[in-house]
Image: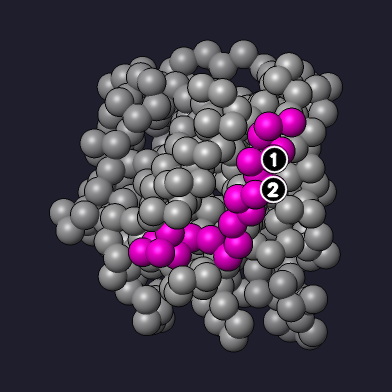
Amino acid sequence: MADVERVAEALARIERLDPELCAFIEVWADEALERARTVDEGLPLAGVPFAVKGPTGIRSYAAGRLMAAGAVPVGSTAVPGPGTYWQTWGQGTHGRTVNPYRADRTPGGSSAGSAVAVAAGMVPLATGSDGAGSVRIPAAWCGVFGLKTTNGLLPSPDRTGLASAGVLARSAAQAQAYLRWVLDPGAVASQALPVRLPVPAVFSPDLGFARPDPEVATVVRAAVERLVTAGVIRLGPQRRPFALLDPREAWLAVRGGGAAGTAGVRAGEVRAENDRRLDGLFARTSLLITPVTPNRPHGHEGPGELYSTALTWAFNLSGHPAASIPAGFTPDGCPVGLQLVAEQGADASLLEIAQAAETRAAAVRG
């Protein structure tokens, strides 16, 4: 398909679907078509339409690298509106962003519009950022692939060091193009270690402290079993289930600039102990598998007392790369995500494992 046709098709889908889904803040139709007409067809991503997260996403390092590779930005996607203390929905031009599978549920966030735009086929790729699960949660709840890169691998405006650049795509294979062209070629080559299947893995349904919804847990366990059957992973014997300390207070302390007194000491101890446990885990295995969230997509009124981030934000503190792949659906039609976590810097290998899951275990969709 010609570059202009690909971009025009994306814009047509946005025009048709976005009034209902509310995934976009802005759509740059004229600019996108002009860029598609003039892009160098020899570039590796020539004419590939993509969306950027939020009003400042076009100025991100990742967006710049994608455009340099020939990709065409078509618009900026919805993020939480002003005054939202829980970051799991978006506010688009046409209203509140809705889950493409169930309009009465949130798509997750804060990369809400990016996930919806990809899930609905408006774009094949969208940028995101992840400070507590903001790529992985909407990826899980919208049934698409999402990657949080290793902390510090790509530039981030977040001074706390918690937020990492990420990507949402229909598949890990599509996301691989993002990593290949956003990173320097040398960085990709240094990560490209061969992945031998089955990959040794550890499965933790709750990280020792979360309380997953039973129906979510059932979907996740079934997805893990499919991966084992397909020869993608090998679960080794465990003397005891792998567990971390609940990172909630440690994450909040870092986000708040550090806590004083006893609270600050305790937060630092939790973070150090979790780092020690993760170092020990990845010294003997290649992959940690958990649910992405303990809960299914909640309603637009909010999550109540539940923390959708319970199983994700530990890896923003530790810096490990983590991905969400579709695991299946609860009986009421809500998508569930499976979280894959690898050692720091192993982003390329993590994408290879995710692709193996997609191709060898029927996309882990159930």
Q: Position of residue 363 (x, y in %)?
A: 35, 30
Colour scheme of this structure image?
Answer: one colour
Q: Which one is in front, 65 or 283? A: 65
The percent coordinates of residue 101 (x first, y second) are 29, 55
Place of residue 201 in the rendered image (x, y in percent of width and height, measured from the top left): 47, 31
Kindly identify the residue that appears in the image at 53 percent across and 53 percent down: 114
Q: Residue at x 53, y 61 (%)?
A: 24
Q: Is residue 61 visible?
A: yes
Q: Is residue 51 magenta?
A: no
Against 317, is 166 above or below?
A: above
Report the amino acid beneath label 2.
Glu
Badge 1 amino acid:
Glu
Callout 2 touching callout 1 (CB < 8 Å): yes
Q: Residue at x 66, y 74 (%)?
A: 252
Residue located beneath label 2 in the image: 31
Looking at the rendered structure, the secondary structure element under dot 1 is helix
Q: Residue at coordinates 73% horizontally, 29% vertically from top-left?
A: 39
**Residue 22 lies in the magenta-colored region:** yes
Q: CA distance from mark 2 to mark 1?
A: 5 Å
- Residue 167 visible in the shown view: no
The image shows residue 366 at horizontal and vertical percentages of: 24, 36
User: In terms of secondary structure, where does tag 2 sit?
Assistant: helix
Left or right of 121: which side holds 169?
A: right
Q: Above or below — where is 42 with respect to 94?
A: above
Main SS of residues in magenta: helix
Label ID, residue 168: none
What is the magenta range? 18-38
- Between 305 and 335, which is closer to the camera in this rendering? 335
Characterize the local packing of mark 2: few (<14), some (14-19) or many (20 or more) Cα atoms within 10 angstroms. some
Circle 1 residues within 10 Å: few <14, some 14–19, many ≥20: few
Where does label 1 land, which residue?
A: 34
